[in-house]
Amino acid sequence: MRREALSRTRLASAARNRRGMTMIELLVALAIVSIGVFGLAGGATLVTRLTGGGTIQTRAAAIANAHIEQFRSMSCSSVTSGTDTVRSVITTWTSSAITTSARRGTSVSMTVQYPTTKGMRSQVYKTILPC
């Protein structure tokens, strides 16, 4: 009986001593949470930058598409080489007549340059306009 009473008091004493967290445990937990929060912040920055890059690429492609659609509405002889700048997107195109026994048309090669965080980037689009 005496052993049981002694063991109960030890358990009760141990439970009272371990009720809270120590300062070191709190600091370790805070460090782990801080690393996670900084990781999430870095990921959010990357996603924001990539989304912005996609926006300017979409704008450049839309401008190129508008030019090509404008050329399709024109007669082949009136499509000439040129340059245009719209919303910091520089578009340069060249056209050349295609005349073969099987085909007649105009070949258009268009270079679109747009700014990024690392400098200017360019994309080339090529199409043939049937006549």
Image (cartoon, grey):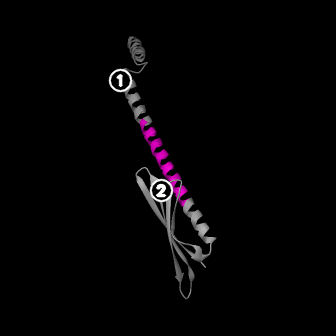
Give the quadrant of the C terminus.
Answer: bottom right
Q: Position of residue 23 (x, y in %)?
A: 37, 21
Which residue range is magenta in the image? 38-61
Q: Which residue is mark 2?
A: 114
Q: Earlier in the sequence, mark 2 or mark 1?
A: 1
Q: Position of residue 129 (x, y in %)?
A: 58, 75
The quarter holding residue 15 reads top left
Q: Secondary structure at mark 2?
A: strand
Q: Amino acid at mark 1?
A: Ile
Q: Is residue 43 magenta?
A: yes
Left or right of residue 22: residue 113: right
Q: Which residue is mark 1?
A: 24
State the CA–CA distance, disc 2 to disc 1: 53 Å
> Mark 2 or 1, which is nearer the eye?
2
User: Does residue 75 lie above or below 29 as drawn?
Assistant: below
Residue reaching furthest to the right: 73
Left or right of residue 25: residue 69: right
The quarter holding residue 80 reads bottom right
Give the quadrant of the N terminus.
Answer: top left
